[in-house]
Amino acid sequence: MAECGRVDSHTMDKSITLPPDEIFRNLENAKRFAIDIGGSLTKLAYYSTVKHKVAKVRSFDHSTKEAASDKLYEISVQEEVTARLHFIKFENAYIETCLDFIKDHLVNTETKVIKATGGGAHKFKVLIERKLGLKVDKEDEMSCLIKGCNFVLKNIPHEAFVYAKHADSEFRFQTTDPDIFPYLLVNIGSGVSIAKVESEDKFERIGGSSIGGGTFWGLGALLTKTKRFDELLQLASKGQHSSVDMLVKDIYGGSYGYLGLTGDLIASSFGKSATADKEFSKEDMAKSLLHMISNDIGQLACLYARLHNLSRVYFGGFFIRGHPLTMHTITYSINFFTKGEVQALFLRHEGYLGAIGAFLKGAEEDNPNQYSWGENYAGSSGLMSVSPDMNPMQRARSGTFDMLEMDRLDRQLVNLPLLQEPSSYIPDTVDLTEDAPAREYWLFCFEDALDGVVKRAVASQPDMPEAAVRAEKFRQKYRHKLQTLRYQPFAYGSLTVRSLLDTREHCLNEFNFPDPYSKIKERENDVALKYYQKVVKSLEELSWEDRQFALVRGVLAGNVFDWGAKAVSDVLESDPEFGFEQAKRQLEERPWLVDSYDQWLERLKGPPHKCALLFVDNSGVDIILGVMPLVRELLSRGTEVVLASNSGPALNDVTNGELQILTERIAAMDPVIQSGLRDDRLTLVQNGSSSPCLDLSRLDKALAMVVRERKTDLVIIEGMGRAIHTNYFATLSCESLKLAVIKNSWLADRLGGKLFSVVFKYEVPAGKPSQEAAVLTP
C-alpha cells in the first residue's frame, strides 16, 4: 500500500491508507482544478474525462446476407468518454506531499489557473503555485459555499438529513423539494455567517456572530490546555455539563412551571464555577462550553429564520463537520427555541461545498448546471461517522481521506409531471437505515448473490481473457461496500434495496462490465419473439372480459422472468425449458395478495384513456409476451401508449436500444403495433435511468415533455423493483396501475403472502370517483 503523508504516533494525523490512484483517480485526464483550504482540512476538486465501456445493440438488416447468423441484433462493447467531478478531502498536514503527488501524475492538462477559496488559500498560495505551476485565482468564500450548496441539493437526492442522537436511526434523510429555494445557510467556521439564499444567483448575508467554532476552540484550549479541535470534542463527549452549568433546578429546586421551564434547562452557562470550591474536569468544562456556543448559535439561527419566514435551515462549517456531538447540540437548541417548528438540517457533503462552488465558478464556460449529475457510489467514500465509539473499519478511515465523485449524466433529469406532491415524494418503500431486520436480510442477500453476478459478468465477455481478473476486483470492491454499509447504513443516504442495486451497477461499470446479462437477454428475446403471434392469436379468440383477465395474467407471468430474483434465476438456470405457460401456473389464484382487478375491469368498461405511460421491466417473455399484447389492446381501445424503458443496462431489464429493435420486429408481424408506430400513437422513450428500480423524481426531461404533450391520464408500473421496492406508496395526479409478482420468499412472508404472490394495485387520485383500493404495508 502506498503512503502519501507522514505518520506521527503522537497526534491524531494518519497516513493515507488507500493506494493514491484510488484517491486521486484519473489524474492523467484532469483539468480545471479548484481548492478550498480551511483551518485544518483541504478540499481539492477537479474535472476529468473518464473512458468506460458501454454495451450497444445494433439491428441486423434481415434482408441481406449480414443476417446469415439469424441473430436478432448485434451486441458490441464500445468505449465512451464521460465527464466526472472528483472531490477529495484531507488534513492540511498532507497538503505538500499531495501536491507533489498531483504534480508527478498530472499530464496533458490545459489548465493554467486553479480556483481557490477558504481562509487558508492565502497562506498556501505560494506553495500551490510553486508545486503545480498554476496561477491561484481566489474566489469569495461565501459565494462558493452557496454555489456548492445549491449544486448538492439539486443533484444528490439524499443530501440533507436531520440528526436524532437517541433514535434507532441517527440520520434521517430528507426528500429534497424540487424547488430548493429559499433557504437559510448557517456557516459555522471561526465565527458564524448567516445567509438567506433566494435563487441560484441571489443571496444575502443577513447576519452573523463572532461567537462560533473558533470561540469553542480558543476558549476550550484555554480551559483544558487541549490544542486540537477533535480532541476537544472527544473531551466534551465524555463530560457532564451539569457539573459546571447552573440549571433551573439549582435555583428554584425544580422546574419553573409558571414560565414553562423544566428543571434540567441551563439557567447560566458555567454558573457553578463562580461559587463552587472545587476543580472542574476538562471533560465537564468542554461539554459546558459546547452547549453554550451551540445554544447561542441555535437561538440566533431561529431568530433569523423567523424574521425572514424560512423553514429550511442548513448548517455547515468546520464546527459541524459531521460530528455527532455538535449536530446533536445544534439540533437540541433549534428544537427548543422553535418548539419543533424548524428543523436543523445538515448536509452529507457539507465539507465539500466551498470546493464545489469554487470549481463551478471556474467551469462556468461549460455551464455545468445545464446537466444533471449523479453520485458515483463506486468512487465515493460516503458519510463517515467520527464518533469515538465507531467500529474499527470506520476508525481506520476517519481523519484520513474522503472522496466524492459525481458523473455527468447524458440527459437532464426532472420530476414526473404527474406526481401529486413532488416535495413529499419518497421513491423507496422501506428505509433499511431504520429497519434493522430488513437491512440484515438484504445485505446478506446481496452478498450471497455475488458469486452469481461474478459468474455472469465473466460469461458476458468470453473473448476477453482478463475478464476474470476484473470480475474478482468487482467482487472485492462491492463486498467492501456491503461491509461498510453493515456498520454505516447511512453512508450514502437512506439505505434501500434500490441503493444496494445501484451501488452494484456502479461497481460493475467501474470494472468495465456494462451489461453482464446481454447474452441472456438476447437469447430470451429471440425465443419469445417466436411465440408472439401464437399468444396474440389465443388472446383474440377469447371474449372481451376473458381477454382482459388473460392480458393481466400475461403481464404478471412475464414479470416472473427476472434474473435479479434468486428464486427465479435458480429455476431458469436449472430448467432452460421453463416458459410462459409454466410461469402462469406459478401465479397464485385470485383473490391476490393485493387485488384491485375488479375495479380495473369496471374502469375498462368506460371510455378509453387518452394516453397510457407504461414503465416496462424485463427483456424476453416479460416485454414481448406480457407487455406488448397489453399495449396492442390499449391501442385498439384508442389509447395512445408511451413505453418508458431504461436508458442503460441493469440486470435483465430491457433497454431503450433493445426495445426499439424488438418493437420493429413485432411491428413487422403485427399490424396493430405497426399502425401505432406509423401514426405516432405508440412512442418509445428512455426513462433516464440505469437502475432496476424507479425514481419518479429523476426522469429524462424528454419523457416528461412527452407526458405533458400527450396529456397522459394513466400510468402503469410493472415489476418488483419499480412497483414494490419503489413507488408502492407513490401518489399520482392521474389513474395508476402497479402490478408485480413477489419473487422473494422473505419479502412475501413479510407481506403476509407466499412466493409468487400477486400485487395488482389500481388507484384513482383523491377527488375522482373510485372504489376503495386494496392496501398493503410492506
Image: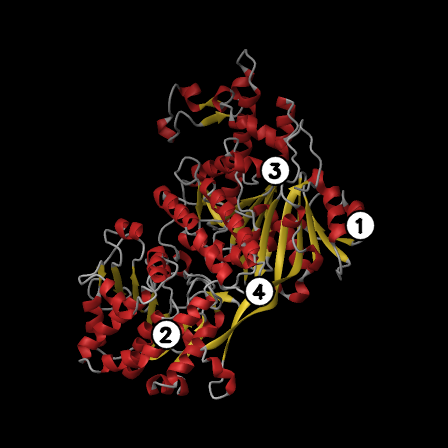
| Mark 1 or mark 2, earlier in chain | 1
Give the CA separation, mark 2 to mark 4.
27 Å
Q: Residue at x 24, y 62 (%)?
A: 586
Image height of 284 relative to 439, above or below: above
Disc 2: which residue:
527
Determine crowd level at label 3: few under 14, some 14-19, many 20+ residues with C-alpha closer than 10 A.
Answer: many
Q: Amino acid at mark 2?
A: Val
Q: Of residues 719 and 152, which is closer to you in this image?
A: 719
In percent of width and height, residue 360 lies at 65, 58
**Direction from residue 726 to residue 158 in the image, left or right:** right
Give the CA separation, mark 4 to mark 3.
34 Å
Q: Nearer the viewer, mark 1 or mark 2?
A: 2
| Mark 2 or mark 3, earlier in chain | 3
Q: Is residue 344 visible?
A: no
| Mark 1 or mark 3, earlier in chain | 1
Give the CA separation, mark 1 to mark 2.
63 Å
Mark 1: which secondary structure?
helix
Q: Which mark is residue 399?
A: 3
Q: Of residues 299 and 606, which is closer to you in this image?
A: 606
The picture quadrant where one finds residue 135 is bottom right
Disc 1: which residue:
129
Q: Residue at x 26, y 55 (%)?
A: 755
Q: Of residues 326 and 62, which is closer to you in this image?
A: 62
Give the CA separation, mark 2 to mark 3.
55 Å
